[in-house]
Image (cartoon, coloured by chain):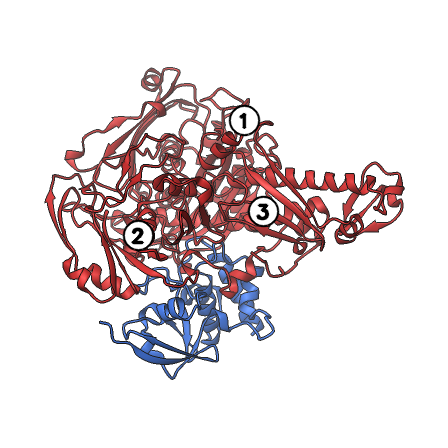
Chain colours: A red, B blue
Amino acid sequence: MTIMEPRKHGDASDGTVGGRQTRFEGNLKVTGGATYALEYPLDGLAYAILVQSTIPAGRVVKVDAEKALAAPGVLMVLTPDDDMGLLVASDWGGNRPENQPYYPLPRQVQYNGQSIAAVVAESREQAVEAARLICITYEKAPHVAGFDDVAAGEGKVMDNLTSEWGDAETALAAAPVQIEGEYSTPREYHVAMEPHGLTVKWDGDRITVWEPSQWSHGMARSYSEWFGIPYENVRLVSPFIGGGFGSKGAALAHGAVAAFASRKLGRPVKLALTRPQNFTNYGGRAATRQRIKIGATEDGILQAIVHRGASETSTYADWPEQTGAATPILYRIENFSSQHRVVPVNTVTPGALRGPGKNPSAFGIESAMEELAYKLGMDPLELRLKNYADHDYQSGKPWSTRRLREALTEGAEAFGWSRRSHEPRSMRDGKTLIGWGIGCGTFPVIQAPSEAMIRILRNGRVEVVSGAIDMGQGTYTILAQTAAEVFGIPVDQVEVHLGDSRLPGAAIAGGSMLAGSILGAVHKAATAARDELIGLALNDEKSPLRDTGANTLTFSGGRIAAPRDQGPSLTLSELMAALGRDEIEILRNTLPDGATAQEQHQAWTSMAKIQGPTMGEYSMHSWCAHFAEVRVDEDFGTVRVSRIVSAFDCGRLYNPRLVESQWRGGIIMGIGQALLEEGLVDQRNGRTVNSNMGDYLVPTNADVPHIEVISVGIPDYGASALGGKGVGEVGIVGVAPAIANAVFHATGKRVRDLPITLEKLI
Amino acid sequence: MTRTIHLSLDINGRRYDLDVEPRVTLLDALREHLALTGTKKGCDQGQCGACTCHVDGSRVLSCLTLAAQVEGRQITTIEGIAAENGELHPVQAAFVEHDAFQCGYCTPGQIMSAVACIREGHAGSDEEIREYMSGNLCRCGAYNSIVAAVREAAEMA
């Protein structure tokens, strides 16, 4: 990608790591010049449309495609009768069953809205028309619509998520003050603005896939394994992604269908999911429920937490939305017990959605803490500070950095918390009840290796090359800043190439792990390239810097010189010309030295090399505290969020302008979660009723007040090479309880079941 | 249905001729037939605003507009609002400056809405901007910055 010249703002330091550089690819995005997956013009393109099941469980007996095949422009109909000859690909851990056939259009129906047929035609309109003509005969089976269905049962305990220390039940029973509550969250969806879909083209046994991807290498691996072709034969291209939020990290069945159709037809194929299909073709956040019991002393010291949670999963895979993820680490707690179950129901397997686990978990514990505060008659801020965790009581390890105390106190100061009156319904503006609430959040630091290439070109430009992706988090920008800083050049002298599985490997843009990982690799490669250039400049007989007698060189203000102004200074292009070099190219990764090719492949295409937050000496996490103000119409029960102040400890910020945008984005998604978002299921047939953007409500501009965000973090060099912790996930965590707590403060009604809709308040 | 009709469309001051089925929407005509992919498809059912274009200066949802309906009218898309020399429209520049987007997918629709919102006289206050920009969803949550960008561009206009 060639980047148009970015506008420069403020001072020169904007272009270095930590500066407020405007978005590197900004001009492309505001002019319509950024090219997303379905926008690559290809000759001879055919259009595919999926047909989804209308029953929740059973078997496809017959697909009558006769009329569809006879419709104008139709090229192909694919059904469960077609054996595509595919094999199951590896899971995220890199594990793969041997020679297991893969049926992306399966005969067995496991949820309503499962893809079971596809129509390919000359035009999209023709494919849509023909898809309506397909007649499917089913043999129905009993179904479970959701985990509140009596037939769902209790599900099964996920043993790996059980966490216990001390003697929680005994300590709870002995505690003079106890609270207990059950908290639940509904199915929630990503609703990325860009629907899923892909354009795919074969050249012999080589395939190019243009598909929005949070992980170009991992998804390329799936295509190679499905089709039994070498990994090198797959090219997955994804320079721009219209939002992912966890949904675009894995190749999905529709990708296999499109690729198969393309190979069979010998033509490129474009397949776009309709907006409703985006609600069932892949999973959103699972519905959850959790029961929390807290025991405390009369002066508010926590004695025990007992947590029992459950989440929905599908009938064919266990995906836990871990309701006990934040519960053990937010507070000092000596006696703790947590268990999580998954309950299989007839849904598509749920998936990762912003702040997976931590998010519903924080809704539970942060609501429960405020319930305890009211039971004690204590300021909820004071209760939180009083039970501040000096270390991680779960792992027993010290925190790497934890500025949650500062987040709470500085957030409270900015919000004006001290002006709060404690009693519910005690603050109002005419007929509008006003309430204030707090919610804390956390997300682990997940570390992963990455690889990056730096090229110094003869024209003095520096290229950063990586298969990492940018779906709006700011990868282009912060990589350009990193290279600019290392070479002492302006950002507009840097080019960044991303989003292509043929480029050097990178961690997934998920779990808030990419920035810390890829910046480490780019910084390492850029530093090595600079060292190589220094070596040449000091030793090459053609170099004007050779005679300075210096043993190193400085890179500053776009010029290279010996320290303390000894001798000449040159620009990068002048030095490259003097050296007679066209290019210096350096590839570096952050794997241990001597990693084999196989280990490298595994690192870029699976999660096998990922490190969790407590795998080293420390316990490493991002932290935040949200302060929300709501205004509730006393007569109608309508809730408006009127003010939010959120303070974050995400370590060092590589670009505060972009970080603030991501934080606000997470908070806004949290406003949606608190007040609007709820996947509704028809119990009779397991159908997602509100599978569109008009009925599944996400926040609009008018739903969102000004949001003040504050950074209280300090660099954490244990968490990442350049000192940052994760930014993207943590923003949403704790928002919903902050709002629920504010609604309680305003109205005196405790809503434990999201979203907080008006019928729950009147 | 296989019959095609001939259309001559005036888009961004240029004439485009195309033969399409009468059921083809303006959005699909732009994206699939004319390689003008700056206009985005988010929902294809008039709910998200990503496909917002101008027809005779007013904002329309191109996914709910047939291409055949807009023959003889002036269509403006995101590709048509910067100056000939490439200088950004003040709304585009303000979006970059205020970081009023992340993934960029809703951005063309937001900008087309914003240009019209200002022209309509609906950018008088933050409250008014929020209301009149609420037909354009942004899942990345850039709303604060969108309001700031529209306000700044409105003050310059």
Q: Nearer the viewer, mark 2 or mark 1?
A: 2
State whether residue A737 appears in this view.
no
Whether A694 is drawn above or below A142: the answer is below
Whether A112 is drawn above or below B6: the answer is above
Crowding near pointer 2: few (<14 within 10 Å), some, many (20+)?
few
The picture places residue A58, in percent across and down from the top left corner, at 14, 41
Image mark 2: chain:
A
Residue A264 numbered mark, or none: 2
Q: Which residue is mark 1?
A: A399
Secondary structure at badge 3 equals: strand
Q: Are marks 3 and 1 on the same chain?
A: yes
The picture places residue A687, in percent across and down from the top left corner, at 20, 48
Whether B155 is drawn above or below A698: the answer is below
Q: Which residue type does callout 2 highlight?
A: Lys
Quadrant of residue A64 in the image? bottom left
Which of the pair A490/A672 is nearer the observer? A490
Q: Which residue is mark 3?
A: A465
Which of the pair B95/A135 is nearer the observer? A135
Image quadrant where one finds the N terminus of chain A: bottom right
Is residue B96 rendered to the left or right of residue A173?
right
Q: Which residue type does callout 3 highlight?
A: Val
Which of the pair A155/A513 is nearer the observer? A513
Q: Are marks 2 and 3 on the same chain?
A: yes
Q: Nearer the viewer, mark 3 or mark 1?
A: 3
State whether residue A618 appears in this view.
yes
The picture places residue B83, in percent across and down from the top left corner, at 57, 74
- Distance from the alpha carbon under mark 2 to that under mark 1: 55 Å
